């Protein structure tokens, strides 16, 4: 074997090592990007859940608002309707985020189950279902289908459930 052939073999091995290193760096970059997106999405989902829940406990006016919009026979003002529309839109966005994260395998099963439970709970009310039927066309197919499935199951409202 000549020095020239050893040189060419060494060059070939070097090229293979460089290409393998580039693929390893590319793979690590993709993993880091996926982890970062997952953490960001997870944090965003937790923050969204936090915005929807504690207000009832800390704000009596907000609790009164929910009574007005969730009881079928309660009168709703135009302001109540806008606030309820905004609230339900936020709820659908939170559920949609969870649904999208689930489809990408980037959310824990319990977090998705909690988000689904919240949507099931809200969709038991006639006004929530009515609002969904009028607004559903504005949401993506996957989220729309998932919420349509929840609405089709027609959970029993707390008013109908007798302890």
Image (cartoon, rainbow, N blue to C red):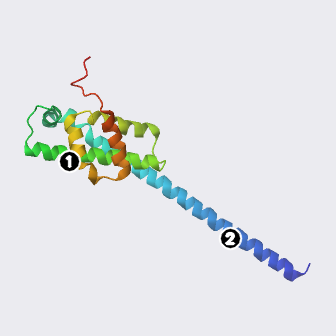
Which secondary structure, mark 2? helix
Name which residue lies at 41% across and 52% down.
Answer: 40
Where residue 86 is drawn, which disc sits there? 1
Q: Position of residue 163 (x, y in %)?
A: 26, 16
The residues bearing labels 2 and 1 have C-alpha atoms spaced at a distance of 54 Å
Towards the viewer: 94 or 1: 94
| Mark found first going from the N terminus, 2 or 1 | 2
Q: Position of residue 3 (x, y in %)?
A: 87, 81
Q: Is 94 left, or right, of 4 in this rendering? A: left
Outermost residue to the right? 1
Outermost residue to the bottom? 4
Name which residue lies at 36% across and 46% down.
Answer: 145
Name which residue lies at 40% across and 46% down.
Answer: 99
Q: Residues within 10 Å of mark 2 (few under 14, many from 20)?
A: few
Name which residue lies at 36% across and 38% down.
Answer: 116
Q: Position of residue 115 (x, y in %)?
A: 36, 39
Which secondary structure, mark 1? helix
Res. 96 in view: no
Q: Which residue is mark 2?
A: 18
Q: Position of residue 46 (x, y in %)?
A: 35, 43
Looking at the rendered image, the quarter that the N terminus falls into is bottom right
Q: Image height check: is 4 above or below 69?
A: below
Outermost residue to the top? 163
Q: Image height check: is 83 above or below 157?
A: below
Which picture quadrant has residue 56? Answer: top left
């Amino acid at each position: 074997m000549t020095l020239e052939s050893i040189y060419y073999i060494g060059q070939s091995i070097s090229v293979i090592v460089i290409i393998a290193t580039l693929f390893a760096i590319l793979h690590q970059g993709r993993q880091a990007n996926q982890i970062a997106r997952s953490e960001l999405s997870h944090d965003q989902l937790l923050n969204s859940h936090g915005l929807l829940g504690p207000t009832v406990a800390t704000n009596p006016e907000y609790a009164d608002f929910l009574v007005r919009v969730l009881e079928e026979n309660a009168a709703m003002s135009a302001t109540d309707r806008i606030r309820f529309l905004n609230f339900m839109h936020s709820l659908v966005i939170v559920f949609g985020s969870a649904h999208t994260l689930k489809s990408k395998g980037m959310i824990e099963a319990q977090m998705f189950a909690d988000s689904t439970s919240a949507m099931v709970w809200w969709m038991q009310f006639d006004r929530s279902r009515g609002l969904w039927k009028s607004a559903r066309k504005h949401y993506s197919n996957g989220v729309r289908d998932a919420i349509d499935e929840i609405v089709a199951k027609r959970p029993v409202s707390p008013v109908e459930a007798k302890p």
